[in-house]
Amino acid sequence: MRRDDRGLTRIRALRIGAVAAAVGAAGLASPAYAHVTVTPSTTTAGAHAILAFSVAHGCAKSPTTAITIQIPARITSVTPTRTALWEVTMKTEKVDPPAVDAHGNRIVERVGSVTFSTGTPLPDGYREVFELAVQLPEDTGGKLVFPTIQTCVTGESAWTEVPQDGQDVPELESPAPGFVLSAPDAGTNHHAVAGNARLAAPVPASETVDGITLAALVTGLVGSVLGGVALFRQRRRT
Ligand SMILES: [Cu+2]
């Protein structure tokens, strides 16, 4: 970022420090949430994930008009969530040589970047969240980085710094959003991590709450379907 943002750096550092202290006191991890950050629904390699990119301030107080998220080459499947206030455009690029996905499909083209732009700029002091549904790469332990350009009414911020080995993200002035892929749970594959296949798979202890919720949901659905049938029958009889 910060061609135009340097004056705020110290104030922001103090503010982040205060927030980090408060969050730390609450016993939670403290993301540098004042920046443009990404929160993945899962970091499991090969999983289908929803990536939530959040923008928490303008460029030196100037309202945000667009953000462009660069998609790492190892991600070949991207579906952005549509939003009411932002227009979504995707830039595709050739995959050469073609890749083969987990289902054996040949991939010759992929989304290289996604841009959300708006005619009603996001004022400084408000936050916005942009979602992308992706399939994460299969390799575990790898770092996924999404260099992002935030464009404002005046100026822009480039969230493109990538930590080098031995460097921590908080040391960076304007880090690119990113996260590290984790290993799948034993006995599951990417189909079992999200979606219907999970219902048939044994529920690992770590997912018990989800499992119960899903089971309740399914029971509820079956119940309402049966209820509906009963109602329908009754109506036909009367
Ligand atoms: Cu920030």
Image (tube, rainbow, N blue to C red):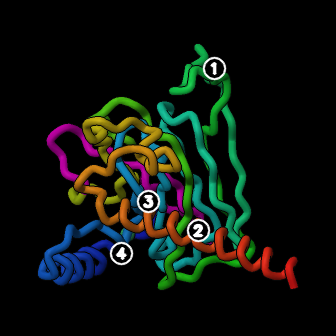
Dividing the picture into quadrants, the one containing residue 181 is top left
Mark 2 or 4: in front is 2
Q: Secondary structure at mark 3?
A: loop
Q: Amino acid at mark 2?
A: Leu
Between the C-alphas of marks 2 and 4, the distance is: 56 Å
Kindly report the distance in space between the C-alpha atoms of the residues bearing marks 1 and 4: 49 Å
In this rendering, which labeled residue sits more in front, label 3 or label 4?
3
Left or right: residue 11 compared with residue 150:
left
The image position of residue 93, as x and y in percent, is 66, 31
Residue designated by label 4: 7
Location of the C terminus by quadrant is: bottom right
Q: Which mark is residue 71?
A: none
Residue type pointed to by label 3: Met
Q: CA distance from mark 3 to mark 4?
A: 12 Å
Q: Which residue type carries mark 4?
A: Gly
Q: Which residue is mark 1?
A: 106
Q: Amino acid at mark 1?
A: Arg
Q: In this rendering, is residue 97 above or below 55?
A: above
Q: Which residue is mark 2?
A: 221
Extent of the magenta region:
147-169
Q: Quadrant of the N terminus?
A: bottom left
Q: Which residue is mark 3?
A: 1
Mark 2 Cα shell of 10 Å, populated few (<14), some (14-19), many (≥20): few
Circle 2 — which element? helix
How far apart marks 1 and 3 lie (CA) works out to 37 Å
Q: Kindly report which numbered mark, 1 or 4, lies closer to the viewer in this rendering.
A: 1
Q: Say which label, 1 or 3, has the lower sequence index.
A: 3
At horizontal 18% and vertical 46% (from top left) the residue drawn is 167
